[in-house]
Structure formats: structure tokens, C-alpha cells
Amino acid sequence: MLSNYAIAVLTSSNRWAELKILIDSLSLVKYKKLYIGNVGLINKHKKNLEDLGATIIPLNANTIGKDPSDKLYHSLISQRVPFLREIWRLHKGSILQLDTDTEFIKDDFKHLDMTTDATMHVRGDDGPNCGVMFWHKPERCQEFWDTWEDMWRGPVTLRCPEQDCFGKALQACKINWQELHCRYYNCMKDEWINKDTSIIHYKGKIYRREELRQLCAAF
């Protein structure tokens, strides 16, 4: 189902171990092209990615969205929209946006509604999580991307700046969304694991990756 999708991953060299896990798991799925958003990759890692056929897109981590509590992380995710926009310029097709600390478990995406413009993942009352996003029709998401990026230039919460900006953009600009629970393609919690879980999101904790993988293997 993802054979026409570009895979989009923002990363830096301090996330290299996680990125290797994600790239290894790509062998489980068919996809169109891998794009890496470079926010501080060292030359050795760039060469490794290029040898794998990835297209590396250089990004400026010092533009918008910085916060002194975690400059690298917030600078990185503030480049989400410029990265997506550049992929759209090169690819002109559907995009699967992934955080570095995600991993494919299997190739099963039957719960996606690809007739919508995009699929966001929600966590019940906690709202959306932007770690995994399916942009089915990017041509119809341009205004939303612009609004999302604009929100980074205003005041944001320190704890979850990306979710804060995303939520404000949702209120300001409407597109045809599919809202899908995180249990399928952005699974972070033990109790969410089910037979259709295809992507886990271990939130930077390698030990959580192993725990989630073991639970998936039980189905």
C-alpha cells in the first residue's frame, strides 16, 4: 500500500542508532523513495545513507522554533514543514513522515483511508501525536503546512511545541483528515498493541523498543 509513498525522516547524528533501526525495518515494506532531513549529520553518516540510496536534504536548524530548554530537538522539529515542502517539490506524491525512533513491524496498512488528504494519529483525549503522519494528497495540504509553519513563529508551549503548533493549525485551517488511533501505526503503549500494529514508536528509549516488539510478536 505504500509503494507510491516517499518516506520522510528528520534526523541528526546523535540519533544515528535509532535511524539505523528504522532503516533496517524498511526492508519489510515497499516504498517509493527515502528522504532524510539533515539537521546535523556528520559526513560519515551522510555517506552511509547515500550508499543506501537515500536523498539527503540539508536543513537550517537555526531558523525558527528554537527553545533554550532543548535547542537541538526543537530546532530539528521546527524544520518539519520546510522538509515536507522540499520533498513535495522533488517527489510530487504521497509522503509518510516518521520520527527517527519509530520502527516498522509489518506491512499492513488496511486501516488507512487514502481517499482523505492526510491521516493523523490521536491518543484519545491527549490529542494528536505528530511522530507518524501520512500525507496522502500533499497538493491539498499546502495551506495547512504554511499555517503549521507560521505557528512556530508565535508563542509555543515548552513541553510539546510541535503538538501545540499543530493543534493551532488544525483550528485555523481545515483539510480532509482521517483521525486514526495510534495503536496501528504510531504505537507507544503496551495496552495499544494489537494484531494490526504495524509501526511502533518507542520515544527514544531502546529498552521500550524491545518491550513493544515482544508484545507485537505475541500476536
Image (cartoon, rainbow, N blue to C red):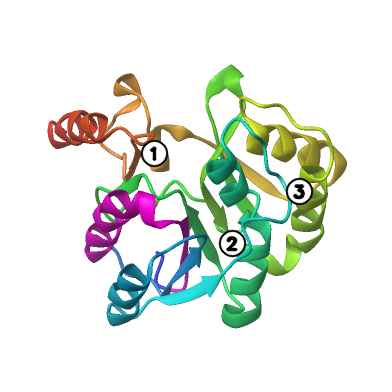
The percent position of residue 74, horizontal first and vertical second, equals 60, 42
Q: Which residue is mark 2?
A: 136
Left or right? Give the position of 106 relative to 189: left
Which callout, 1 or 2, points at the residue further toward the start of the chain? 2
Labels 1 and 3 touching (C-beta < 8 A): no
The residues colored magenta run 4-28
Q: Which mark is residue 184?
A: 1
**Can residue 6 be seen at all in this image of the molecule?**
no
Say if mark 3 contacts mark 2, CB within 8 Å.
no
The mark closer to the camera, 1 or 3, is 3
Q: Is the stretch drawn in magenta largely helix, strand or loop? A: helix
The disc at residue 148 is 3
Q: Earlier in the sequence, mark 1 or mark 3?
A: 3
User: Of residues 164 and 79, which is closer to you in this image?
Assistant: 79
Q: Is residue 172 visible?
A: yes
Is 2 located above or below residue 189 in the figure? below
Residue found 32% across the figure and 55% down from its top: 16
Label 2 element class: loop
**Dot 3 amino acid type:** Trp
Counting residues from the start of the chain, the first of labels 3 and 2 encountered is 2
Q: Is residue 205 above or below residue 56?
A: above
Instruction: Name the kind of residue labelled 2 in the image.
Output: His
